[in-house]
Amino acid sequence: MSKTIDTSTLLSVDGERSRTIETDSLEIFASEMEKVKDALPKKIEANPENAEKGLAKLVLTLIELIRKLMEKQAMRRVEAGSLTDEEVERVGETLEKLENKMKELKEIFGLKDEELNINLGPLGDLL
């Protein structure tokens, strides 16, 4: 019976692109599993506190990414002169409020700026 290893959601340690391998050989199967083992967590700590903090970390990372993208887009529009003075003021206030709320949420969940990042393997860090 053929065994399938689907590594489509994993990146190998040496930075190779993901791939699916189908084999009847247990040796090949074990060898391929050995290659991707470092991409998997050593153990999963499934307790409510870790789950809550992990979810908060993911959500706040995505919000921070969106905030930075909005900020860059706003700066481009300001530099291009496509916003009125009132719109510039409103965008500035909104971004400042969002930044303050992010600080507050990071404090609540005990997260630091450097923790709000996702490593994308060979592509580098998200933020």
Image (cartoon, helix red, strand yellow):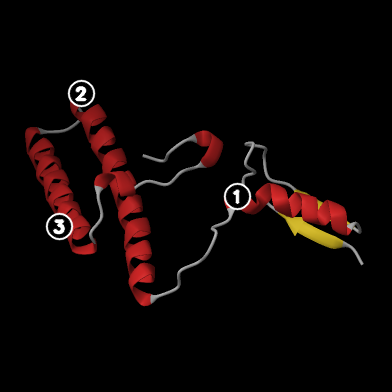
Disc 2 + disc 1, Cβ < 8 Å: no
Nearer-N-terminus badge (2/1): 1
Q: Image point 17% across, 48% down: which residue?
A: 99
User: Where does residue 11 sit, x and y in percent of width and height?
Assistant: 62, 45
Quarter of the rendering occupied by the C terminus: top left
User: Where does residue 15 sit, x and y in percent of width and height?
Assistant: 62, 36
Amino acid type for the residue under numbered disc 1? Asp
Q: Quadrant of residue 45?
A: bottom left
Gap in angstroms between the C-alphas marked 1 and 3 = 34 Å
> What label sits on residue 79 in the rendered view?
2
User: Image check: 19 left or right of 49?
Assistant: right
Observer-side mark, 2 or 1, equals 1
Between 8 and 113, the residue placed more toward the observer is 113
Image: 15 above or below 108 = above
User: Where does residue 82 sit, x and y in percent of width and height?
Assistant: 20, 29
Task: Please tell me how many numbered marks the rendered image carries.
Answer: 3
Q: Image point 41% across, 41% down: which residue?
A: 126
Nearer-N-terminus badge (3/2): 2
Crowd tier of the residue under label 2, counting other residues whose Cα lies within 10 Å: few below 14, some 14–19, many 20 or above: few
Gap in angstroms between the C-alphas marked 2 and 1 = 45 Å
Residue ID for mark 1:
38
Residue 17, can we see it? yes
User: Image check: 84 left or right of 61?
Assistant: left
Residue ID for mark 3:
104
Q: Image point 32% across, 62% down: which residue?
A: 56
